[in-house]
Amino acid sequence: TDSMREGKPVAVETKHCIQVCMFHVIRQKYPYSHRASTRWHCKPNRRLFSLTRLQHTKSDAFEVLAESYEFNEIEGRCLAFRRAASVLKSLPWAVQRLEATQDLPCLGGHTKAVIQEILQYGRSFEVEKILSNERYQTLKLFTSVFGVGVKTAEKWYRRGLRSFRDILAEPSIHLTRMQQFGFLHYGDISRAVSEAEARALGNIIDEAVRAITPDAVLALTGGFRRGKEFGHDVDYLLTTPELGKEEALLLSVIDRLKHQSILLYCDYQASTLDMDQLPCRRFEAMDHFAKCFLILRLEAGQVEGDLQRVEGDSRSWRAVRVDLVSPPIDHYAFALLGWSGSRQFERDLRRFARLERKMLLDNHALYDLTKKEFLEAKTEKDIFAHLGLEYIEPWQRNA
Ligand code: DCT
Ligand code: MG
């Protein structure tokens, strides 16, 4: 980080802080205006997709490889491909020759072989083989249902089930409530949510929150906070300045949405926050804040422009997935940083904290292992400062 402050490229300095550093390096090398930068992550993406985006399926070659390893529960390789994809995405220039990737971090031999193949033949035979694999196709289909994870998908696949029709016609399969609603609203919730739809939902939630607690704190998080134009859901944090009242606020908001008849599904999870159990070392573990996973009904009239739906769909509404998370106000900054993502950015920031700073960071807190104490933060800026990192805006966290 010292050399980072001096403006020297440090992306290859250590393996631990690659992604965090990549952003700083790229920012210093390629300065851009604030307005332009909200789209900054999109442009290089598009250029990259001309390299690794598979024309016929519109998916990303590395994402397919990562997913295939995820389905085979080979976590290390899965993360390696996600990290490689993320480094390539953060480049403001298109890779045209393999030599150009020489000094980039996180690109292993396997990744480079795939890049070389794509540069040479315009396709990756390994990726094409995965895409035509029946198990991959089936797991991809099953895990696209809300409430179905890799383990369940695998179980169904092993039983010889290959389609939604097979699952729904199989009397011995007992779907969870979440899966039932996942199937019921499949067409809607597997369709991307637009920025305009996210904004409309924001208005609805804001109105509900204000009616209950006028001084409540409500923040859009997830991909939309990072400036993405589309997402798979809409994520919000909501809390109150009055410590201990946040859970009641969330329950009242849910109640209000129910009375407005727009609550199609609600999976409420009460808070299990216990400071004695922190810090948590498992990244993938769900945090302990009170939260709910919802499916809400969004009316066309509430959205500026059109609803995202298939042609010929004459309904005046669509279903949208919404997550509401309610941390106590003294954990708010950590929850905001964690829920703003991206997942890859969070993973790398945590890794940086652990390996470079001997600190444990998660959605709840930052713990200094040397001093053996929790470090307080009111804002995200405080957390970056504790980590000795320059603050970066959410739109720069699209790793
Ligand atoms: N997150 C978390 N703990 C979870 C789930 C998510 O800390 N159990 C964080 C990581 C990213 C962020 O919250 C939002 O999660 P998603 O909605 O899955 O991702 P996204 O970046 O908003 O992308 P999408 O556009 O697909 O919703
Ligand atoms: Mg999201």
Image (cartoon, helix red, strand yellow):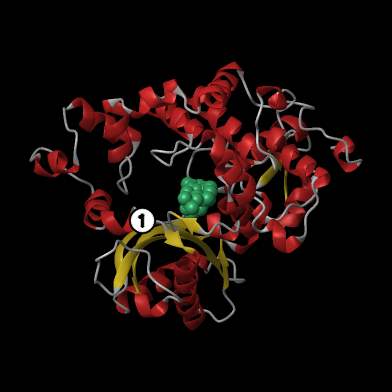
Q: Nearer the viewer, residue 198 or 270?
A: 198
Residue 331 at x, y = what percent?
A: 62, 56
The vertical placement of 247 against 71, above or below, is below
Residue visible at 41% across and 25% down? 73
**Taking 178 as reference, is 207 left or right?**
right
Looking at this view, is 144 or 292 the one in front? 144
| Image quadrant in which the N terminus is located | top right
| Residue 301 in which image quadrant | bottom left
Q: Is residue 348 left or right of residue 68?
A: right
Which residue occupies 59% across, 42% down?
A: 278
Residue 179 point in image, percent of width and height: 25, 49
Residue projecting furthest to the front: 121
Task: Give above or below for 216 relative to 173.
Answer: below
Residue 49's place in the image compared with 81, above or below, is below
SS assignment at label 1: loop
Q: Is residue 327 visible?
A: no
Amino acid of disc 1? Arg
User: Can residue 125 be seen in the rendering of this structure?
Assistant: yes
* The C terminus - image quarter: top right
Check disc 1 and report the residue beneath it. 191
Mark 1: few/some/many CA within 10 Å (<14, 14-19, 20+): some
Q: Residue at position x 71%, y 37% from top?
A: 353
- Direction from residue 157 to residue 332 in the image, left or right: right
Instruction: Give the x, y percent position of residue 328.
Output: 57, 61
